[in-house]
Image (tube, rainbow, N blue to C red):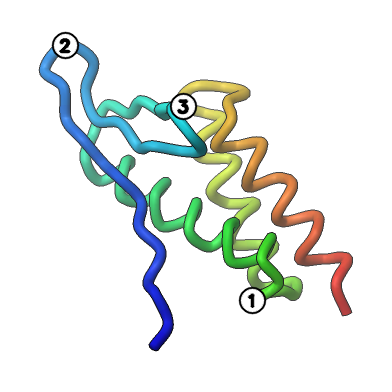
Amino acid sequence: MLEEPVVTIRHLATVGWQVLLDGDQWHTCRKEQDARYIAHNVLIADAVLRGERSGEEVARELDEAVAMIGHQVGECPAGQLMKDAAAYARSVK
């Protein structure tokens, strides 16, 4: 049976919603909905980088997430992960 990947989301009253990226890096969001959206796209990016997903459609979805994150917080590890995964998804034939 395949093991489902897990992304940790938490709420801290002092900072807001956070999504655990790799290791101990947290991406902070103002709203729970944003945290869930980012977590969803982190899972997609991880699947691309593991070779489980590829193609232009996946890359466009990740590009949209990068744009949303960029408007919120600018450059960050979550955005970079998704950019890298989008580029990889486009390169795999």
> Image quadrant for the N terminus?
bottom left
Of 86 and 25, which appears nearest the observer?
25
Question: Between disc 1 and disc 3, whose residue precedes?
Answer: 3
Give the distance between the C-alpha atoms of the residues marked 1 and 2, in whole angstroms.
37 Å
Instruction: Label 3: state its secondary structure.
Output: loop
Q: Residue 14 carries which label?
A: 2
Q: In this view, does 88 lie to the left or right of 71?
A: right
The quadrant of the picture occupied by the C terminus is bottom right
Sort mark 2 into few (<14), some (14-19) or many (20+) by Cα contacts within 10 Å.
Answer: few
Q: Which mark is residue 25?
A: 3
Residue 8 to residue 14: above or below:
below
Query: What amino acid is found at the position of numbered circle 3 in the picture?
Result: Gln
Q: Which residue lies furthest to the top in this view?
A: 14
Q: Distance between the residues labelled 1 and 3?
A: 24 Å
**What residue type is disc 1 on?**
Glu
Residue 52 position within the rendered picture, expressed as x and y whole percent measured from the top left: 64, 76
Q: How many marks?
A: 3
The secondary element bearing badge 1 is classed as: loop
Q: Can you give x and y, in whole percent of width and height, for residue 32 in the image?
A: 21, 40
Mark before the other along the chain sequence, 1 or 2: 2
Q: Is residue 41 left or right of residue 45?
A: left
Would you say the residues marked 3 and 2 are in contact, meaning their CB atoms lie under 8 Å apart? no
The label number, if any, that marks residue 52 in the structure image: 1
Say which residue appears at 32% left-offset and 41% top-offset. 35
